[in-house]
Image (cartoon, helix red, strand yellow):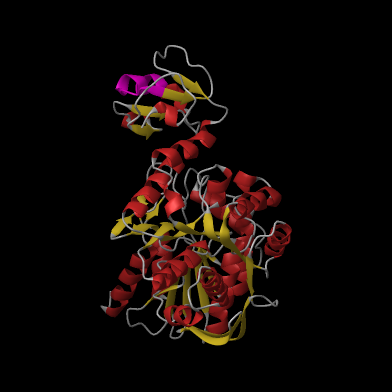
Amino acid sequence: MNLKSFFKAENDLEITGLKVDSRLVRAGDLFICIKGYTVDGHQFAKKAEEAGAVAIVCERFLEGITIPQIIVESTQMELPRLAHIFFNKPTQKLNLFGVTGTNGKTTIAYITEHLLSGFGEPVGYIGTNGIRYAGTIIDPVNTTPEALSLQETFFHMADSGVRNVAFEVSSHALALHRADYCLYKAAIFTNLTPEHLDFHLTMEDYFEAKYRLFTRITPNGCAVVNIDDDYGERIVQRLRKNGIRIFTYAIEKGADFQAKDIHMTAAGTQFFLNCPDGTFVVNTPLPGIFNVYNVLGAMAAVYSAGLPMEKTIGLIATLSPIDGRMEIIDEGQDFTVIVDYAHTPDSVKKALDYVNSIKQNSVTIVIGCPGDRDRNNRPVIAKLSVDYADRVIFTTDDPHSEDPAAILDDMVKGLDGKRFDIITDRVKAIETAVTTARKNDILLIAGRGHQKLQYWKDGNVYLDDRNVVKNALRGIKNGN
């Protein structure tokens, strides 16, 4: 591809690739200098030139560079445009079903992926649990990949015959322009509660980042919005002024897709669905009120794209458990162990509400808070835990650069007179909860869900809560 395909340039250069990491540059590449949190790509422009880059895209003139420099206002905003062009505008060949919100993104994307199979065409998924399409499975790095990787993934999906893609779109990706040049057949809003305020600073900034998804709906597309959430109501009010097609969903309010007469068990959920096609009985193996919302959002999205309701309901009944989302670990024990990703105040409360609604004896929660994240959430999560669980074990989540003891101190401040245990070592905390459980107890291991690495300042270690639980349960069975 010629440089003139990207810019009004005098140089007639052939571009064979795009790179943002100078260590990966090969002859013929166009190097884009990205300013990250800790590293500024402008510092590596000379290395990129030496490795064979034929031109540099940068935000200021760089001394000592002999190859052409294209100076732009923001390389971060230019990167998705360049990637979109280089990979032949792949999202124009795909129907994207984008999901955003604080909680529920992964589950709705998973359900949507499952339902999209009803169209009889290959389906793709991009999100917290990785990337999946046409037999390809890639482990996760970010909820939403960086712009270059994202557009390349869309290219390979389209090239593999994928037509529909369930796509988690994080607020970071929207704010940092990773998902620019993506248009959506359906844009789904789950909810908005305090999270990532270390990045967005205010809830209004957080909301506006999420709202960007709804400015990129295709002319024949649809917004799917949870109106039981106040921010969802705000989105609907804005979109109606712009003439955007909307399907609302809710439990408490009248909506286009509303769940009524909800009956929950440990084995799943049944409810009556009121929707544009009438009233239907819906059965899903997914537990909890929060999953009723997730099912509603996914059903509304695929319905908006033309999937018949009868087929949608049949597919909902065949859902499989989701990795690390209210995942029940069963090794034949006489109590219930659930591993869940709940790590925000809202998701922790919802998880505890659910387990309390089905408990026969007592509820134990094992939980911590991650380092380098919103510290204001720590005492809130701790208080919710002691208020809603019968027994609480506070432990280490992902410390990142912080001291685990300091994180735990932040959590338990203000809990005077409340009963809880602190076991800093997460493995020991989980093992203690498992080995001391009684018949008909429920253990909720919260915070990390599907994650398999624990992030520490000095390096990451393998830690899968589910495997720790299984090993502990097998130890009980074997009398260890």
Tell whether position 475 is magenta.
Answer: no
Q: Nearer the viewer, residue 272 or 400?
A: 272
Q: In this view, does 278 lie above or below 31?
A: below
Q: Residue 192 location in percent, x, y? A: 64, 60
Q: Which of 247 and 466 is in front in this view?
A: 247
Please indicate, yes or no, whether residue 36 appears anywhere in the rendered image: yes
**Seen in the image, is 418 located left or right of residue 284?**
right
Q: Is residue 232 above or below residue 115?
A: above
Q: In this view, does 254 lie above or below 192?
A: below
Q: Quadrant of residue 353?
A: bottom right
Q: What stretch is highlighted in magenta?
A: 45-55
Q: Residue 243 location in percent, x, y? A: 69, 59
Q: Which of 8 and 193 is in front in this view?
A: 8
Tell whether position 49 is magenta.
Answer: yes
The residue depicted at 48 percent of the width and 58 percent of the height is 96
Q: Nearer the viewer, residue 254 or 340?
A: 254
Quadrant location, the C terminus:
bottom left
The residue depicted at 32 percent of the width and 79 percent of the height is 331
Q: Residue 25 location in percent, x, y? A: 32, 29
